[in-house]
Image (cartoon, coloured by chain):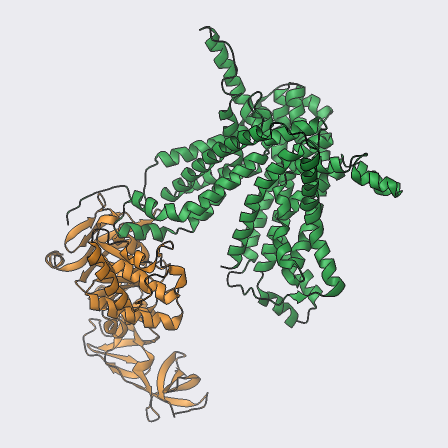
Chain colours: A green, B orange
């Protein structure tokens, strides 16, 4: 055999190519809003900063921190007991509840907030009934005051506790039965083992879940805006639009980013500990204590309560409003708008994520995996920050373009900043990490030895991709598309800020109607968002189950 | 080396002065190796000795810093040019099995048979299924097979296109000990039946003994010895090889003649010249089976531990010098711990290494000798 094909390019040493350049480009895109926002912090000399410090800054910090702490307490108080009961006890309905408890994830917090506000209205059914039975004022008063920091904390806790529940349940399940048995054999009672072994071992997972919930809390715009709670996100939008103070908004955003960065670091540290505590050679079978009588009913009620309040009750209310009260309107054209936008965006996001994942696979260099780590941090960027960080540079570019083209007699207009393209760009920045995470975990299951086997059995690199990777990656790619689709559909602040004039989506419509206090009319669009939002929750539950039965 | 040049046409695989690096560090240094046609070779060494990198280079997944790789006399790799993996005609079985999870057993085996006609491919597949003893399981998916079955399918898949050389990268290390030994002999029989040349990488000497015609013992990127299992075990060229391939102990001795040393166990005679000057301090390497317990021997030591093996005991006997030696004792010689027991040497071949210390004597003729008394 002669040397038919000679190549200096081998697996170990590969020149950067289109894949790698795309990966770097994507990392720069994700970094763009952050760099823009931080640039204002470092280089802007505007007077607005001292004005912000004197007036609103401390209020924003105080409210954001209060809300975060309240949500952290809330999600732990709901998520950990539920995970504990589901993991260690047998009672009627346990299997069903174990995944029904994930359903509130389908709710964007703002829809829950609108629904409860409508439900607890002074003239609404709940308070009308309470007045009819002369309920004491201390019961009715907190319900009337839902538009407050505690109210927002309750709404956010009800939709964010599944993060803690999922991670805590996984940690409980992954604890080797023999570690607990070792505790019993050393003379510890059941509750001592729980406090001294089970909880300490699950703590990193609980902390990680809580930090994720707090990140979502800091990113929330719809709920706090509707409840009139002045946090960073509402402050940024108010400064940007209300005061027309770009520098001030960017500086507020960079402080918010500082908080988020702190959370990201803490979360990474906890995650590292999770690996450390989970046992590879675990023996999962353990005897669950069977609960009977009142104890079983209490366990059921405790697990059913968050499900009722976070999903069943609001969904029933939305369904009722949709069927009997809501004014029709343009639901179908809104749905079409939303689906086309989410469809295009999720295809773009997953396409870019695929290129990045394969760049890492085909060009394994440490600096490139650092680039990917940067992309992976995108999940922590609040939508408001992304929107502002994208709008500022492209808005400036538009002005510059318009000025330049006016010389040729072209009418000035927003070439980029009012386009669907920029909206999709922002979605890519925001959701690339989500897609990337899914694809990387899918790709890691195709070990390099599979590629090598294919090559040694006579396939070229591209044949290996077609014949081995395409069939094996199909599931991960579809999952990533679905998750991005739903995330785009639910995303409110970035859509609100960047959408083209007169372009409405379901989420924007719900926001507008709620803003006009037409909460009942918002029900059909809300239900549509939630119905689609249920798909990834079901998928998530299936993958968790598959992982447990591996 | 002109001798290798002429022979290499006949060899299945030739490595010449191969130098490789991994993540910037040189891990293989100037390795030469020739594997005959139909020969089953083995690279044996501790983890990190460069054996897997060497295998990757032969497969075409690793660039060369220096040297050359030839397959049946044709150049595969030089520092400047490499035949792509898919054009090499080299098969490989991986440590993690690497079966394609989306294909059935027969589709996995057929994966490399794209250039074969349908009937030919079908014949080859059923022939291989017979060979690996998995007839009737051709429609199963990999996850429906046991670990040992998966590894056999991986072997069949790699053998299917009749590669000129088969590489096996620790293919048994994921299996339990008993299965590992059985599979190594089984795979040897399968490969011999198919008349294929192969190179196995492992860190387990028993696996190497079960599998290979010749074993190359590697250490820190160099091949210390390439020989049959018998020679490596009984005539190791270095203390590293001696210790790596089986149990044994070293006793201090000094050269007392052309073919003899004096030791705490008396004057020991060798069947060949050492080439070391009289008086040179040496280590004599003794395996447990070189020493027999004998009540009548004048050489005695204290019994400090014993391990019952059924057919015999392995005694640990401490000599006056403090050295502890292993020795075999008949099953019914059940001495108490602490007893003084007799030892007798039963040697075919005396394994002697010069003590490693810089030799200062100018008239010392042996380059290996590093410690003659002044």
Q: Is residue A172 left or right of residue B257?
A: right
Q: Is residue B180 above or below residue B67?
A: below
Q: Residue A257 appears at what percent x and percent y?
A: 60, 33
Res B336 seen here = yes
| Residue A505 figure quarter | top right
Residue at 70% x, 48% y is A308
Examine the image and state in which quarter residue B365 appears.
Answer: bottom left
Q: Is residue A179 left or right of residue A480?
A: right
In terms of depth relative to the viewer, which is nearer, A331 or B203? A331
Percent across and percent down for residue A126 are 80, 40
Does residue A69 show up? no
Using the rendered view, name the quadrant where residue A153 is placed: top right
**Above or below A548: residue A40:** above
Name the outermost residue toward the front: A324
* Percent coordinates x, y for residue A483 in the rendering: 52, 41
Viewer-side residue, B3 vs A196:
A196
User: For this rendering, which residue is in front, A114 or B28?
Assistant: A114
Query: Horizontal placement of B28 versus B273: left or right?
Result: right
Query: Which x, y percent locates residue B104?
Result: 34, 58
Marks counted in the figure total 0
Residue at 57 percent across and 29 percent down: it is: A334
Q: Residue at x 35, y 75 (%)?
A: B247
Q: Measured along the vertical axis of the image, is residue B292 above or below residue B113?
A: below
């Amino acid at each position: 055999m002669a040397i038919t094909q000679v190549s200096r390019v081998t697996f170990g040493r590969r020149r950067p190519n289109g894949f790698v350049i795309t990966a770097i480009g994507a990392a720069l895109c994700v970094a763009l809003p952050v760099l823009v926002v931080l640039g204002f912090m470092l280089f802007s000399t505007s007077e607005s900063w001292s004005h912000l410090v004197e007036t609103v800054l401390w209020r924003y910090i105080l409210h954001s921190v209060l809300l975060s702490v309240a949500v952290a307490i809330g999600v732990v108080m709901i998520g950990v007991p539920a995970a504990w009961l589901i993991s260690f006890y047998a009672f009627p309905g346990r299997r069903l509840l174990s995944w029904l408890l994930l359903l509130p994830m389908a709710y964007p917090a703002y829809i829950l907030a609108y629904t409860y506000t409508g439900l607890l209205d002074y003239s609404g059914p709940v308070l009308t009934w309470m007045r009819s039975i002369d309920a004491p004022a201390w019961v009715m008063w907190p319900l009337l005051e839902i538009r407050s920091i505690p109210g927002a904390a309750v709404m956010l806790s009800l939709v964010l506790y599944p993060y803690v529940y999922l991670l805590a349940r996984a940690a409980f399940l992954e604890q080797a039965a023999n570690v607990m048995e070792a505790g019993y054999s050393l003379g510890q009672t059941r509750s001592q083992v729980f406090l001294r072994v089970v909880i300490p071992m699950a703590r990193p997972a609980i902390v990680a879940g809580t930090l994720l919930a707090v990140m979502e809390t800091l990113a929330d715009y719809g709920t706090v805006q509707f409840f009139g709670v002045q946090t960073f996100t509402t402050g940024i939008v108010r400064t940007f639009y209300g005061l027309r103070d770009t520098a001030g908004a960017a500086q507020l955003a960079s402080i918010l980013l500082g908080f988020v960065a702190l959370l990201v670091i803490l979360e990474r540290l906890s995650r590292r500990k999770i690996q450390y505590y989970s046992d590879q050679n675990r023996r999962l079978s353990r005897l669950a204590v069977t609960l009977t009588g009142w104890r079983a009913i209490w366990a059921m009620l405790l697990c059913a309560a968050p499900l009722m309040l976070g999903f069943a009750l609001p969904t029933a209310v939305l369904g009722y409003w949709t069927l009997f009260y809501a004014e029709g309107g343009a639901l179908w054209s809104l749905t079409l708008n939303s689906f086309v936008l989410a469809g295009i965006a999720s295809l773009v996001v997953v396409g870019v994520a695929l290129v990045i994942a394969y760049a890492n696979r085909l060009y394994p260099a440490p600096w490139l995996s650092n680039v990917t780590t940067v992309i992976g941090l995108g999940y922590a960027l609040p939508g408001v920050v992304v929107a502002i960080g994208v709008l500022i540079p492209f808005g400036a570019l538009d002005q510059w373009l318009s000025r330049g083209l006016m010389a040729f007699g072209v009418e000035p207009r927003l070439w980029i900043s009012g386009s669907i393209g920029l909206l999709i760009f922002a979605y890519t920045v925001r959701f690339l990490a989500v897609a990337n995470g899914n694809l990387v975990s899918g790709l890691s299951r195709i070990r390099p030895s599979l590629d090598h086997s294919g090559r040694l059995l006579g396939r070229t690199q591209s044949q290996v991709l077609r014949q081995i990777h395409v069939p094996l990656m199909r599931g991960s790619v579809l999952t990533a598309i679905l998750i991005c689709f739903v995330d785009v559909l639910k995303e409110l602040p970035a859509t609100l800020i960047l959408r083209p004039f007169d372009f409405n989506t379901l989420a924007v419509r719900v926001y507008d109607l709620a803003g006009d206090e037409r909460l009942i009319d918002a029900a059909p669009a809300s239900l549509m968002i939630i119905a689609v939002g249920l798909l990834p929750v079901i998928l998530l539950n299936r993958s968790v189950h598959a992982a447990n039965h591996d | 080396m002109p001798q290798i040049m002429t022979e290499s046409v006949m060899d299945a695989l030739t490595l010449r002065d191969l130098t490789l690096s991994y993540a910037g560090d040189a891990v293989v240094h100037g390795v030469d190796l020739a594997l005959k046609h139909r020969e089953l070779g083995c690279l044996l060494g501790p983890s990190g000795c460069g054996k897997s990198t060497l295998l990757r280079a032969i497969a075409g997944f690793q660039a060369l810093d220096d040297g050359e790789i030839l397959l049946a006399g044709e150049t595969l790799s030089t520092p400047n040019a490499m035949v792509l993996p898919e054009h090499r005609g080299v098969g490989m079985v991986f440590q993690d099995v690497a079966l394609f999870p989306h294909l059935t057993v027969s589709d996995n085996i057929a994966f490399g048979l794209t250039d074969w006609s349908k009937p030919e491919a079908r014949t080859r597949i059923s022939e291989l299924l017979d060979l690996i003893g998995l007839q009737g399981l051709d429609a199963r998916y990999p996850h429906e097979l046991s670990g040992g079955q998966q590894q056999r399918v991986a072997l069949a898949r790699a053998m299917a296109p009749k590669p000129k050389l088969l590489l096996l990268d620790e293919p048994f290390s994921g299996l339990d000990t008993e299965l590992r030994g059985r599979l190594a002999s089984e795979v040897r029989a399968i490969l011999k039946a198919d008349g294929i040349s192969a190179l196995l990488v492992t860190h387990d000497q028993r696996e190497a003994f079960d599998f290979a015609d010749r074993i190359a013992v590697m250490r820190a990127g160099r091949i210390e010895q390439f020989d049959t299992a018998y020679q490596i075990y009984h005539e190791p060229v270095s203390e590293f090889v001696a210790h790596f391939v089986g149990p044994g102990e070293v006793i201090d001795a000094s050269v007392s003649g052309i073919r003899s040393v004096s030791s705490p166990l008396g004057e020991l005679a060798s069947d060949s010249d050492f080439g070391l000057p009289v008086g040179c301090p040496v280590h004599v390497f003794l395996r447990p089976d070189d020493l027999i317990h004998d009540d009548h021997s004048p050489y005695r030591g204290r019994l400090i531990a014993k391990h019952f093996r059924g057919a015999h005991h392995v005694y640990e006997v401490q000599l006056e010098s403090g050295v502890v030696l292993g020795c075999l004792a008949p099953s019914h010689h059940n001495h108490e711990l602490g007893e003084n027991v007799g030892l007798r040497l039963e040697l075919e071949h005396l394994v002697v290494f010069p003590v490693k210390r810089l030799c200062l004597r100018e008239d010392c003729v042996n380059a290996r000798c590093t410690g003659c008394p002044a």
